[in-house]
Image: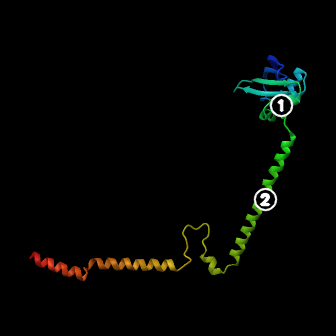
């Protein structure tokens, strides 16, 4: 891995030096940000903590990377000026925030464990309830792999039978004229004659 500095600009207002450079990495994978920081710090004879790699540009099939980094005079200045996500990318951050996040992440996992235990107990209770039922009740229950529903009440079947009987009676009656209709038809036939 070879580092070639293209431009170097001193920015006294922000207490930093801005550097544009390229890295040639023939036969190797693209180096990560930590390796780039350490190699650049070694080349410039500065501490690794003061180097912040802002941008890394690589292209497909080309083993040359274009980078932009900032070298601060002190770590406190870099924390004041740089954005949080850039500091986080470079591994420079406040450890207090990480501890708070770890504590927050523990609480939801505890809640998940409690929920899982509750679900397991519910499942066990339902299994016990099914096992304690009488054999006739078990046969009436629908198993999860069956597609057709089984009837548990006789009332719906009785209602269906009554409806079918009523429909059958109506069909039989359609062929026979009612007594009023018979009289009206006979009068109409007489008038026509």
Please tell me whether residue 124 is drawn above or below residue 159 in the rendered image. Answer: above
User: Which residue is pictured at 86% across the width and 28% down the height?
Assistant: 77
Point out the tag, 2 or 1, that comes first from the N-terminus: 1
Q: Residues within 10 Å of mark 1 (few under 14, many from 20)?
A: few
Q: Which mark is residue 80?
A: 1
Residue at the image position 61 percent from the left and 70 percent from the top:
143
Q: Are marks 2 and 1 in contact (CB under 8 Å)?
A: no
Q: Secondary structure at mark 2?
A: helix
Mark 2, residue position: 113
**Residue 25 appears in the rendering:** no
Q: Looking at the picture, how far across and down is residue 58, in whole percent?
A: 73, 26
Picture coordinates of residue 36 (x, y %)?
Answer: 82, 27
Badge 2, how many Cα within 10 Å: few under 14, some, many 20+?
few
Report the residue at 21% width, 81% height from top.
182
- Rendered location of residue 6, percent (x, y): 78, 16
Looking at the picture, tell me which residue is in the foreground, 129 or 182: 182
Task: Indicate the secondary structure of the residue bearing disc 1.
Answer: helix
């Amino acid at each position: 891995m070879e580092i070639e500095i293209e431009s170097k600009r001193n920015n006294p207002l922000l207490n930093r030096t801005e550097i544009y450079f390229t890295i040639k990495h023939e036969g190797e994978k693209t180096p990560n940000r930590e390796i780039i920081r350490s190699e650049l710090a070694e080349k410039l004879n500065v501490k690794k903590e003061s180097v912040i790699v802002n941008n890394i540009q690589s292209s497909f099939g080309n083993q040359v990377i274009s980078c932009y980094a900032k070298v601060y005079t002190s770590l406190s200045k870099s924390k004041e000026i740089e954005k949080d996500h850039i500091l986080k990318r470079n591994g420079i951050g406040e450890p207090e925030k990480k501890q708070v996040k770890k504590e927050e992440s523990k609480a939801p996992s505890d809640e998940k464990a409690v929920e899982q235990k509750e679900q397991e107990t519910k499942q066990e209770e339902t299994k016990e309830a099914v096992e304690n039922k009488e054999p006739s009740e078990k046969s009436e229950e629908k198993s999860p792999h069956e597609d057709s529903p089984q009837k548990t009440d006789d009332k719906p079947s009785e209602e269906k039978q009554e409806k079918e009987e009523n429909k059958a009676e109506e069909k039989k009656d359609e062929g026979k004229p009612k007594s009023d209709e018979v009289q009206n038809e006979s009068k109409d036939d007489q008038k026509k004659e």
